[in-house]
Structure formats: structure tokens, C-alpha cells
Image (cartoon, rainbow, N blue to C red):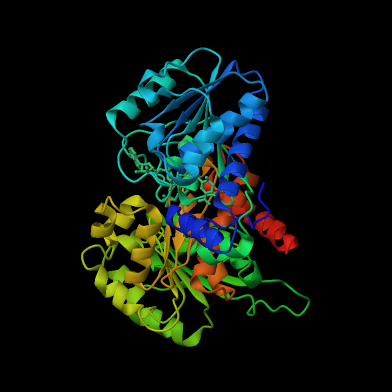
Amino acid sequence: MAYLPSNILLTPEEMARADRMSAESGIPSFGLMRRAGYAVAATALSHFPAAVRFAVLCGPGNNGGDGYVAARQLADGGAEISVHALGDPDDLKGDAALAFQLWGGSVAPLREFQPQPGDVVIDALFGAGLSRKVSDEIAGVISSVERAGVPVLAVDLPSGVDGRSGKPLGAAFKAHCTITFMTRKPGHLLLPGKSLCGDIEVADIGIPRRIIEAAGGSISENGPPIWSAHLPFVGADSHKYRRGHLAVFSGETSKTGAARLSAIAGLKTGAGLVTLASPEDAMAANAAQLTAVMLKKVDTNAELSDWLENAKLSAFVLGPGFGVGSRARDFVLALKDSPLVLDADGITSFRDDPAILFDAFEDGETHLVLTPHDGEFGRLFPDIAADETLSKPDKALKAARRAHAAIVYKGADTVIASPDGRVAINTNGPPWLATAGSGDVLAGMIGAFLAQGLPAFEAAAAGVYLHGEAAGLAGPYMTAEDLAGQAGHAMADLVARF
Ligand SMILES: NC(=O)C1=CN([C@@H]2O[C@H](COP(=O)(O)OP(=O)(O)OC[C@H]3O[C@@H](n4cnc5c(N)ncnc54)[C@H](O)[C@@H]3O)[C@@H](O)[C@H]2O)[C@@H](O)CC1
Ligand SMILES: Nc1ncnc2c1ncn2[C@@H]1O[C@H](COP(=O)(O)OP(=O)(O)O)[C@@H](O)[C@H]1O
Ligand SMILES: [K+]
């Protein structure tokens, strides 16, 4: 594993920049390629000690160069090797040409490759330099390997996967494991790339940390380095008002459960007080099911204004089970100067004129968090959602800038983005988060972090991470109630780590 802080990600463009910067600082680039190739060989031997043959498939760029170095190293160790190349190896340039010379053995054309039982494919066709759809010939090789069922070790990325977006360009290998260099790329974490990489190893090939950090931009894996400095600690001098007062808006009688899930999750995430603001007709239903969470009747705009003036409220959650329409819009506009998590129906209420929402929250520090899943994202940002050239992080960032909000673009690969350019990809959410009401719990967690004073992006990212940790504690077949119930334990674990 690399020595680097593990949450840094580099896009392929940033990795190429790191490569250039290290060459400029005097580090020989062929040394990097050699170490990359050695790392591939070592991973191949440790993962597949019983391989009958390593079939190394080499592309026309430096990814292929890594493949030639690995082939030489494995052959020197006594392994059976075949090498197949895309294009004429005599056309290779720079380090890849040197690596081809180092290999020095025979090379067959890629189209002649026939996977055999006992083969392990070392996929060194394309890595960071994949720039267009793969040809039918390459797609044919990928499908013949898949049909043969032989394992694939991908060098840098499974060929065909776009390292920026995780999307396959035409076709892509499904690897048993992937070895990448210095840092992972967004495409290793985003779907479907994540599911095509298998186990991911990161090898340190000797690019100095300062260069990685200087070349790296804004995308990282979501985790404590992003927000732990802001985590609230409960000390002896804590007072419940100092821990913030979160207000969650309930829907009508038949739709109160979602807001209660948010409210309970908010309390367990450490908000000092949580009040459920309920329409009169839902007061009895809510009262019957709440204890530590307080209840306040709020039906009209006037009642809301009065409450905002007279109560000490730190942050708000609006949307879960709230109902779509003008009441939601009016309430949100009344809250425009407060930290707010807008989820579910709250988001959908602005589908006809999203600019009203975006304009309302334009002033001051970012204090709105939007938590759309795919469907809701498309309602607020239809043009961004439809743009096939954008990755999920690109989409989240564009949306954040337009909406003046931290965006939590949910899914199995949730992305959190800030208008200031920071983007985090979340990886700790288990698949059993796909259960009714889990988004409501997330909204409450983020609301509680806002109430405790975290800035919008940090609150959003910490909330998404806590949600994943709580789901891990709750285990498969959990319900959203179980998830909310684990928020306190997940918080205690987190705070104990820092
Ligand atoms: N610091 C670094 O960046 C290092 C990178 N290394 C390796 O270098 C790789 C990147 O090398 P390159 O930038 O040369 O890129 P690649 O080797 O990934 O691919 C570039 C080549 O493929 C061609 N190509 C792109 N898409 C194609 C398609 N669909 N069909 C046919 N040809 C296509 C391009 O014209 C170019 O010749 C990394 O993935 C990694 O494996 C290592 O050698 C070590 C150091
Ligand atoms: N396969 C998955 N793996 C990890 N997290 C998931 C998966 N599917 C959904 N989630 C997470 O579960 C939550 C579901 O929220 P949402 O779509 O609003 O559902 P609901 O409205 O039922 O609460 C989101 O935080 C989402 O990121
Ligand atoms: K590859």
C-alpha cells in the first residue's frame, strides 16, 4: 500500500501532470515504469501462484510499457509467459519502447490471443490514456476472455474503463484485481468502474508525495480527513443549546414516519435538541410516537415566521414525507437564511422553477444541502443529468455551483460536492442501505451536523460517512429504524477516533 494519505484521488489528467512534474524534478520516468511493472509482477505472483501461464496483453502506450516490464520480470522468475500486442510494437515510443526492448521476447498480434485454461490475463492494454471507445477487435478479445472465465489482473484500470468517470467506453474487462500506482482514480470508486476493478491494490512507484498533492485537485474519497477537524465534541461544559437545535418538518397524518426517522437520527447524531414541526392534523400521530424529540404545531407561513423569530433554531430538515407543492416552496423560502437540508418532496417541489430555489440561497456562506437521488437530481438539473459527457463528480459539482448548495448526489456511489470545487466520493455505504427510509435518516444526520455548526460541505460529507458506518453496525436486513438507532453508536465510534 502506498504511504500517501489514502483519501487522495487523481484523475487521469492529474496523474499525467504528476508524471510530468516528477520528470521535471529529475526523477527518471523509466524508473517509474520499471517499478510499476515490478509491482504488477509481484501482484500477479501473490494473487495467482498456481497460474499455468501469464498472458500479457500490451497496448500502444505506457500501460503496455508496464505490461512488457512485468512480462520480463515474470519470465526471469521462471513463469510461462505469452505476450500479445495491440498494434506494431516497433511503433512504440519513449518509455514504452524501452520496456519493449527490455522484454526482448516474442510478441504475437492481439487478435491471435486465445485464452487457455490455466491462463491469467495481465491486462496492460489501456490505463489512464484511454481516450475513445475501444474497437470491435478489442471488444472481441474482452468477450473471449470473459467467455473463457480466466482471471484478469488489470494494470492501472481494467482496459475500457474511463479513469475519470468509471464508465466503460465501448467494452471493458471485468478484473479479478487491479493494481494502480500512487493513488486510486475516480473511476476505481465510481460505478460501474468500481464493480469492474475487483480488489484494488495501490503500489508506491516513487513519485514524491509533494508532487501528488500538487498535481491532485479537488476529488477525494470521502472520509474523516475532510471533516474530522469540525467534529463536535461533547465536553463537560456542553449545554444542549450549544449542541444545536434541529427542526424537522413533518408531513400530514398519513405521512409522518419519514420526518420522525430524520428527527430521531438527528438526535442520535448529537443535535442537542430536535423539534418536529407538525401540521395540526398530524400532531396526535406524531405525539403518540415521540419521546425525546419535541413537537411544535406549524401549519401556516405565519406560524413558521413566528416560530423562527421566537425560538433558537440552528438548522432545518425539510422534505421527507412533506408533500410536494406551494407550502413546501413557501417554507423553504422562509428558511433561506438558515442552514437547511432539502430532501425528497422538498426538492421535487421546485421542479418547475428550480431557479427560485437557487436564487434564494445565493447569499453568504453555502448553507443549503440538497440530497437528491438520481430521479430528484434530474428534476432540478435536467440538462446536467442528461449530459453524457459528464462524470457523476462533474455533474454534482456543476449542480453545486448552480444551486449555491452542497450537493449529496445519492446512489451506491454517492458523490458530495461543494460550490468551492471540492468533491468527495463515498465508499463505505453497504448495499443494504437500499431500503425504504434510509434517505430520511441521512437527511437527519446531515441536519444534526449543520445544527452542531459544521459548514455545509463538511456536514454533508460527514453525514454520508456516518450513514455508511451506521449501516455497517446495523447489518444486512436492517430497517431504517435500525439504521437511525445505530447513529449514536456510529457517532461514538467516530468521535473516539479523533
Ligand atoms: N505516473 C504515471 O502516470 C505512470 C504511468 N504509468 C502507466 O502509464 C499509463 C498511461 O500511459 P499513456 O498515457 O501512454 O496511456 P495508455 O497506455 O493508457 O493509452 C494510451 C495509448 O492508447 C491509445 N488509445 C487510447 N484509447 C484507445 C482506444 N480506444 N483504442 C485504441 N487505442 C487507444 C492512445 O492513442 C495511446 O497510444 C498508466 O495507465 C500506467 O499504466 C506507469 O508506466 C508508471 C508511471
Ligand atoms: N446499493 C447501494 N449501496 C450503497 N448505498 C446505497 C445503495 N442504494 C442506496 N443507497 C443509499 O441509500 C440511501 C437511499 O436514499 P433514498 O434514495 O432517498 O431512499 P428513501 O427515499 O427510501 O429513503 C441513499 O443514501 C443512497 O446513497
Ligand atoms: K489496463
Q: Residue at 64%, 80% (x, y): give it.
A: 242
Please tell me whether residue 283 is drawn above or below residue 196 in the rendered image. Answer: below
Which quadrant of the structure image shows residue 5?
bottom right
Q: Nearer the viewer, residue 107 or 228?
A: 107
- The answer to whether residue 371 is seen in the rendering is yes
Splitting the image into 4 quarters, where does residue 245 fall? Answer: bottom right
Please provide percent x and percent y for residue 95: 50, 45
> Observer-nearest residue: 117 or 211?
211
Q: Residue furthest left?
A: 352
| Whether residue 240 is situated above or below residue 468 in the rendered picture | below
User: Which residue ends up furthest to the bottom in the rendered image?
Assistant: 309
Decide: is 349 above or below 90: below
**Residue beneath the point at 54% across and 68% down:** 458
192 vs 293, left or right, is: left
Q: Is residue 402 left or right of residue 153?
A: left
Can you give x and y, in whole percent of width and height, for residue 343 in the image?
40, 61
Quadrant for the C terminus in the image: bottom right
- List the single residue furthest toward the right: 236
> What percent of the width, then of the height, locates residue 406?
43, 68
Hey, which quadrant is residue 140 in on the image? top left
Percent x, y for residue 391?
A: 36, 53
Q: Is residue 221 left or right of residue 229?
A: left
Total marks shown come to: 0
Q: Is residue 492 above or below residue 412?
A: below
User: Is there any visible trace of residue 260 in the rendered image?
Assistant: no
Q: Locate residue 243 relative to residue 329 in the image: left or right.
A: right
